[in-house]
Amino acid sequence: MADPTEAGKRQQQSNRRLTRQLWWFVVGAFAFGWALVPLYDVLCSVTGYGSKKELLVAAHAAERVDVNRVVTVEFLSTVPTVGTWEFAPEQSEIRVHPGQLYEATFRAKNLIAQPVTAQAVPSIAPNEATQYFRKTDCFCFTPQHFEANQERELKVRFFVDPALPRNMDRVTLGYAMFDVPQNKVAVLN
């Protein structure tokens, strides 16, 4: 039979090793979440999606409105940090004519009793529609600062390019709202 103190020491070592591994996992998860906003900026600069230069090109495409066609644009929102935000679109969907400029409003509320800065990261589905969905002004372009328990409207102005393939009659615009660590706010501004 093994010495009970030896078995206890092995159990303590095993527990410490597991605790260290779990802490590394937490640190890694935090680092990944923290890096999402800068990664998004890099993605925009590489692909041109969301860039100011691309917006000027998009503005010229908006001059042709296809009044004979209707596309449904759905709005979704997610908040990966439970209990920190309320974030939702005011309308779940709108019907648009390709080429015409529209505006949608989202409501966001900081649920904590301290100031916080957030960044909304957009996604568009189906993926093929991404190149035809043009945002001319969006709250997702810059970090959003909220005071403690502050609620406000966030607007996005957009149009669907008339070149959107005819087989696509529905586009989904989704946003995920992430907290921006205070040490990164100055870098993003």
Image (cartoon, grey):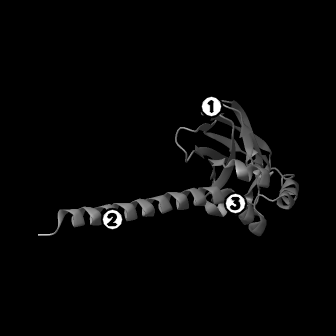
- Mark 1 is surrounded, within 10 Å at the Cα level, by few (under 14), some (14 to 19) or many (20 or more) other residues, namely few
Q: Which one is in front in this view, the residue at disc 3 or the one at disc 2?
A: 2
* Mark identifier at residue 113: 1
On-image quarter of the N terminus: bottom left
Report the residue at 65% width, 30% height from top.
149
Asked if the residues shown at circle 2 and circle 1 are in contact, with their CB atoms under 8 angstroms apart, the answer is no
Query: What SS does tag 2 mark?
Result: helix
Which one is in front in this view, the residue at disc 1 or the one at disc 3?
Answer: 1
Callout 1: SS: loop
Left or right of residue 24, residue 122 in this image: right
| Residue 13 image point, x, y percent | 34, 65
Marks 1 and 3 sit apart, C-alpha to C-alpha, by 28 Å
Q: In terms of depth relative to the viewer, which is nearer, 134 or 98?
A: 134
Q: Residue at x 65, y 34 (%)?
A: 114
Residue behind mark 3: 40
Find residue 112 and report its horizontal and vertical position in percent: 60, 34
Q: Dot 2: within a 10 Å radius of its alpha carbon, few (fewer than 14), some, or many (20 or more) residues?
A: few
Say which element carries label 3. Answer: helix
Relative to 177, 24 lies left or right? left
How far across and down, in percent of the image, does residue 104 sit?
A: 72, 39
Q: Are marks 3 and 2 in contact (CB under 8 Å)?
A: no
Dot 3 crowding, Cα within 10 Å, few <14, some 14–19, many 20+ = some
Q: Residue 14 carries which label?
A: 2
Q: In front of the other: label 2 or label 1?
A: 2
